[in-house]
Amino acid sequence: MATDELSSKLSRRLQIEEGAEDPVAVDVLGHQNGSEEKPSTTNANADSELGAKLMRRGELNEGLGEQCQPSMKVFNPYTEFKEFSRNQIKDMERMFKTFDAGKDNYIDLMELKLMMEKLGASQTHIGLKNMIKEVDEDLDNKLSFREFLLIFRKAAAGELAEDSGLSVLTRLSEIDVSTEGVKGAKTFFEAKVQAINESNRFEAEIRQEQEAKKKQVEEQKQRRTAFKDLQSAFK
């Protein structure tokens, strides 16, 4: 195997450097019975992969490349995107999951293509790549849910060009992001008032959700009781 052969070569090189073995001349041209021996495809692929890794390592050491590492921070959309209400974020999450056909928590190029076609605003291949590039913070050429929310943050802040693909996406999504959060306040006191209002709105939405769930549970209990009464009537 290519890995075993590489390991054997490294071991032999170490032994030669330590003087444990004498170097042996190798027929580089590899002539055997008048014919040239061709390296296997597996060896070529292994050498190519090793060369790419070494080149990448050299670029990182010289400061020419950026090393992307997955973030260990837990993402909470409700605390990071306070300019949006819980309902707005849930609408965006539903839309994201609808078009995440692979169910891998990412929207890749083909899924974005399908999304724009469904919205009636088909984009070119380059246009789709530019849409991803504008919010692709980790440079993985696909959109995470956080990066998807960044699209609507940019739209709410007026940072998207009118004719851009992302701007078209937000306009056709039927998700209203016109409300501004604390970032839009002009003074400290206005920001304080808005922060309090934002907190109250957040708590009110949670209470509404809890009341709706409580009502649903109560209705289910009533239906079960009515069904049992009906069963008893026929016994």
Image: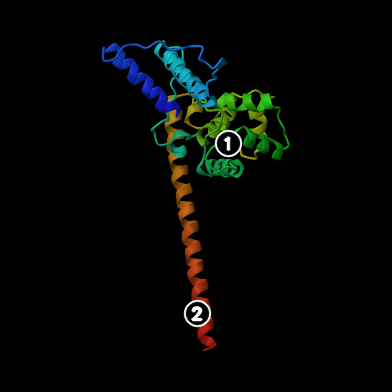
Q: Is residue 49 visible?
A: yes
**Residue 117 or 50: which is nearer the viewer?**
50
Q: Which residue is mark 2?
A: 228
The correct choice, above or below, for 23 with respect to 48 in the image is above
Q: Position of residue 221 (x, y in %)?
A: 48, 70
Q: Amino acid at mark 2?
A: Lys
**Residue 227: x, y in percent?**
53, 77
Residue at 56% in and 31% down: 142
Q: Secondary structure at mark 2?
A: helix
Task: Residue at 55% x, 44% y: name it.
Answer: 103
Residue closest to the eye, 126 or 198: 126
**Residue to which mark 1 is pinned:** 107
Which residue is at the far front? Answer: 33
Mark linked to residue 168: none
Task: Name the residue rendered at 54%, 17% in the picture.
Answer: 33
Picture quadrant of residue 169: top right
Quadrant occupied by the N terminus: top left
Disc 1 secondary structure class: loop
In the figure, 49 relative to 58: above or below? below
